[in-house]
Amino acid sequence: MQVRRFPCDPGPAAWNELLPAGQQRAALKHAVTADWLVVGAGFAGLSAARRLSELHPTDRIIVLDATRVAEGPAGRNSGFMIDVPHDLTSSNYSGNTNHNLREIRLNRAGIDYAKSACEAFGMSAEAFSLRGKINGAITQRGVEHNTGYALHLDHLSEPYERLDANAMKSITGSSSYIDGLFSPGTAMIQPALFIRSLASGIETERLKIFEQSPVHELKREGVTWKAITPEGSVSTAKVILAVNGHLESFGFYDRSLMHIFTYGSMTHALSKTDLARLGGHSEWALTPADSLGTTVRRISGTGGDRLIIRNRATFDPTLAVKDKRISQVARTHDRSFKDRFPMLKNVEMQYRWGGRLCLSRNNVSVFGEIENNLYAACCQNGLGTAKGMVSGKLIAEEACGVQSDLLDDQKSDAQPSKLPPQPISTVGANMVLRWGEFKAGKEL
């Protein structure tokens, strides 16, 4: 199978830009053989490689990534590992009860596997911390979303705390938020630091990661798979594709995956004067009560104290967005920032970027053996951190024949449902997104 296109993310991977220059791994430049090949060095791919090395410590494992570790989506998300229901296709993140209970089990298993990696590889609290998140509401409509979400969490017997306007101002420094719903189980990560630390932690003489080595072709040669890169190749018995929506580029699940780009902006490091004007806690993370509203996060650590804004979403089935899109969404980011933090009117953004996520219409993943000895752990439905960790771990177990109740949970999904033909799907999806953003109002 020829890989017919390659993703293109606009702007820098801001989280990676905050860190000192990391390890520069070589590209694959020769023909090698291995017991296992993992394509993709994000959350799912590195989790799969780690689990394979635990189950088969003497096997040779190769990981290929098309770019540098933490330069792709793994360095472009907002750093939320969310445990409770967070269905991006729902108006309030909730959904079917049985489905939600299963998702909670899987998400928490992913968070636990991430936590075990932090402990095993000596990661800092900046890389990973179980500190929870807030659903923040600015409008009465947002409050109603939070109330409905609270009722759903009650039904699931999940803990939470409601926060009034004074509590929200005490935490965020902003007078804009009139209501909040705090859920304690979310892990917050510095995604680039976490993924770089995970890559360095798992790499051994038997497990090698090659960067800037996109797979251009994947083909059968008898009982062996052969992956061809620009300057080399890997011959292997088994392959795991951990490439999220890029799976469609390999010829699988055509017209079944929704390729969504979301956009973020990060301020310059805040000065002491800025911090005094802002007030609030030094670290907090907020998702919007309306799913198409604005995510906000405040961080302190490597790179200083900063605020991150994320909103706007576009459906881009080509998997490529040009840099000019950044200037188009920047106006919305700046307005959202100034509305929430008028005391920081002179603070400017240092980094702006876009990143990919993959959804299916029926909110299911792609998981399992898709051809003989070819496995996929893809389509994370907007939760690529927690779901990536657990699906990577479980696809390694599936490929190794290790059974568990959790694996049964993961395998219980239906297949992704088909999208309408082009151009209907693109026009329709973007109209739905624009309408949702319009309805979000000041929550955006």
Image (cartoon, rainbow, N blue to C red):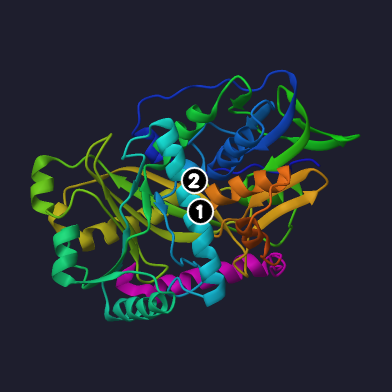
Disc number placed over residue 113 in the picture, else none: 2
Q: Is residue 398 magenta?
A: no
Please state the extent of the stretch shown in magenta in the rendering. 415-444
Quadrant including the N terminus: top right
Question: In which image quadrant can residue 194 be found?
Answer: top left
Q: Judging from the image, what secondary structure is the residue with disc 2 in?
A: helix
Pointers 2 and 1 in contact (C-beta within 8 Å): yes
Left or right? Give the position of 36 relative to 124.
Answer: right
Give the prevailing secondary structure in the magenta stretch: helix
Disc number placed over residue 32 in the picture, else none: none
Query: Counting other residues with Cα less than 10 Å from the Cα at mark 1, is it few (<14), some (14-19), or many (20 or more)?
Result: many
Front-most of 406 and 428? 406
Front-most of 48 and 173? 48
| Residue bearing mark 1 | 109
| Residue appearing at x 60%, y 44% in the figure | 7
Left or right? Give the position of 173 relative to 431.
Answer: left
Above or below 76: residue 180:
below
Is residue 385 something that shows in the picture? no
- In the orientation shown, which residue stands out farthest toward the right? 222
Q: Judging from the image, what secondary structure is the residue with disc 1 in?
A: helix
Question: In which image quadrant can residue 219 be found?
Answer: top right
Q: Amino acid at mark 1?
A: Ala
**Percent coordinates x, y for residue 400 in the rendering:** 72, 42
Q: Amino acid at mark 2?
A: Tyr
